[in-house]
Amino acid sequence: MNRDTVIVHAGYRRKSTAGPFLAGPQFSSTYSSPGDPAQHPLTYGRFHNPTWTAWEDALGVLDGGEAVAFASGMAAVDAVLGVTLKAGDVAVLPADSYYAIRRLASTWLESRGVQVRLVPTSGSDHLQALEGATLLWLETPSNPLLDVCDIQALAETARARGATVVVDNTTATAYLQQPLQLGATLVVASDTKGLTGHSDLLLGHVSTTDAGLGDALRAWRTHHGAIPGPMEVWLAHRSLPTLPVRMIRQCASAERLAACLASRADVAAVRYPGLPQHPAHAIAARQMRAFGTIVSFDLATRARAESFLGALTLVREATSFGGVHSIAERRARWGGDAVSEGFIRFSVGCEAAEDILADVGAALEASPPTP
């Protein structure tokens, strides 16, 4: 069966079972459970919820593993680091990964006695950094620079040296990239972004093919209270069947936008794995179904970048990415990323590609480079 069809029905009630296609969210902090609690599938709301179960079943179908849902992407990241690392361990993380993860590593992890080694996503620095490493964390494509690394090759090397391999799959989503099939031990994602796609939820999840790690992650979630709300989970599950449609359209539009920007002399350093001139285009083509919904580019100066953003009429200025509405921002305003003052991260939405291109083109014409 086509994967798109499988995603549309993932976690939904079977055709042979009467009732709603997707049961409504179950709101309960506690359940009737007389006598021995071990005899009851449901006892307390921090331990389990049927709405989570359906959502995790669907996520497992997408990732090809056992999924555990969390209240946010960072809650999922925290859980992975918490169950895989202890004092004396060595973690290799991308130097260009999502800033909040690097910040967590440099504070919480190092305070627990974990040695953190930062290496660029692209290049060959991973091989030396893996010496004695306990965990290899990859983010590909990286956010916001959109660098790409070879998941399969790095996973084979790391696992041969006894390291756990984690892939942050937020920018690609499970629709475009399957890290567990490429050798990762764990895949983590912020479902706030493209997976749910409507800019109205905070959620995250972790998937693995290791049953022991799955148990450890659920225990972490219970003990730390990093549980998702049933309403958020139900809304996320309701959004999932449109994932193929959304991603196909957004990726196609992103390819057109990247090509258009790359053809302009007044736009520098266009970054998109789908461009033939991207340094890791061949790797991305091999391990991704399409090249993603984000295009990054450089307008050289803060003044021009802000003028460009102000001149956009359709595209909103906001952070995050992956939603159905196109948004863009000057990333240097947050700090933490090695980008110029004029660096733009552009998240391509579901609007007609012609309208996106027209809005961007007009905004660029309205904000020419300083002579």
Image (cartoon, grey):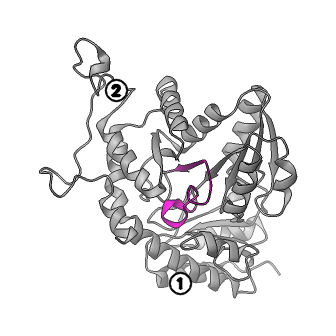
Compared with 310, 134 (above or below) is above
Image quarter hosting the N terminus:
bottom left
- Number of numbered tags placed on the structure image: 2
Identify the image quadrant of residue 105: top right
Instruction: Identify residue type, mark 2.
Output: Gly
Q: Secondary structure at mark 1?
A: helix
Q: Could you tell me the amino acid type at mark 1?
A: Ala
Q: Residue furthest front?
A: 160
Picture coordinates of residue 192, whole percent (x, y): 48, 51
Task: Please rate how many residues cluster around mark 1, counting C-alpha atoms within 10 Å: few if below 14, some from 14 to 19, many from 20.
Answer: few
Residue 34 picture location, percent across and down: 22, 13
Alpha carbon separation for disc pair 1 and 2: 49 Å
Q: Which residue is mark 1?
A: 358
Question: In the displayed structure, would residue 366 be above or below residue 324?
Answer: below
> From this viewpoint, is residue 336 visible?
no
Asked if the residue under mark 2 is in contact with the one under mark 1, i.e. CB atoms within 8 Å, the reply is: no
Q: Is residue 208 left or right of residue 365?
A: left
List x then y, in percent, for residue 129. Answer: 85, 49
Give the residue at x 85% y 45%. 131
**Does 179 lie within the magenta span?**
yes
Q: Is residue 226 above or below residue 13?
A: above
Callout 2: 10 Å neighbours few (<14), some, many (20+)?
some
Residue 235: x, y in percent? Answer: 33, 49
Which of 181/289 is in front? 181
Mark 2 element type = loop
Of callouts 1 and 2, which one flags the residue occurring earlier in the amino acid sequence? 2
Q: In percent of the image, x 50 and y 60: which residue is there?
A: 174
Specify whether residue 33 is painted magenta: no
The residue stretch that appears in magenta: 172-190
Residue to which mark 2 is pinned: 45
Against 92, is 244 above or below?
below
